[in-house]
Image (cartoon, helix red, strand yellow):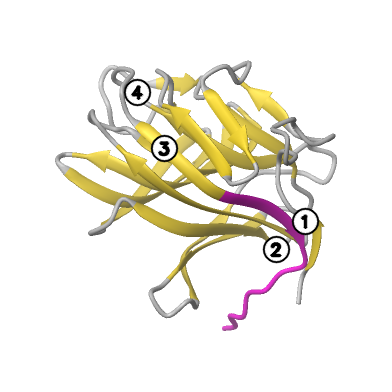
Amino acid sequence: MAEVVEDGFWTQTGELTDEARWLNTDGQHWTLKEAGATCRLQVGDFWQRTFYSPPICKSNAPALLRPFPPDHRVETEFVIEPQNQFDQAGLLVYCHDQCWLKAGIEYADGALRLSTVVTNGFSDWSTQVVATAGCALRVSRTSVQDYVVEVQNEAGAWDFIRIAHLDTKEQDTVRAGLYACAPQQIGGLVRFSRARLQQGIDFAHSA
């Protein structure tokens, strides 16, 4: 079993834990309580260059992050209430604006999509349509540069949906945690019922 390093990103009174930091926000649109966090989606996004013309280069979505060393995993459970195209929420692994990974649920082209975007200079997006607006999700950092994204199925087991590489180095500061944004316009809502960082990798897969 993994040893819990810190069961949460905030205290029971809604204060940030010692190592938790906001990115691209001061947290004013987030409500942190013992039972979870609620966020009204604000304008912003993470995307770099791929597909769209003219190219979209954004790294301004709000997030709540903690240091994320190798042999750790970050986990959350949430429900999103989207209102506009590309409303999204989930987990973010962030090194810098050209090197990051996000995984969660995104509303795109009239459907809810379980999505993962991996960015090493250019963004690589994979999706699958889902029937519900909520999920339990975790990302494990299995080595300095390797990451695994998993979603919890109805039976409670974890299914991996992505094995990814990020160009992160041993000396880099890599952080991970919650993110939520509305690239088009303010409106949607997300409720996170848990968020935690754990030491140890509970993931089995071999060649």
The reply to whether discs 3 and 2 touch (Cβ–Cβ < 8 Å) is: no
Q: Which residue occupies the foreground of this view, 37 or 138?
A: 37
Question: Helix or strand or loop: what does disc 2 sit on?
Answer: loop
In this view, the mark in front (3 or 4):
3
Q: Is residue 80 left or right of residue 206?
A: left
Residue 182 position in % (x across, y down): 36, 25
Q: Which residue is mark 4?
A: 183
Q: Is residue 77 magenta?
A: no
User: Which residue is painted at 23% across and 59% down in the image?
Assistant: 131
Q: Mark 4 or 2 closer to N-term?
A: 2
User: Which residue is painted at 26% across and 40% down in the image?
Assistant: 107
* Amino acid type, mark 4: Pro
Q: Which residue is mark 1?
A: 70
Residue 191 position in % (x across, y down): 45, 41
Q: Mark 4 or 1 closer to N-term?
A: 1
- Per the rendered image, the range of residues in magenta is 194-207
Q: Is residue 205 magenta?
A: yes
Q: Is residue 27 left or right of residue 89?
A: right
Q: Is residue 194 left or right of residue 122?
A: right
Q: Mark 3 or 2 closer to N-term?
A: 2
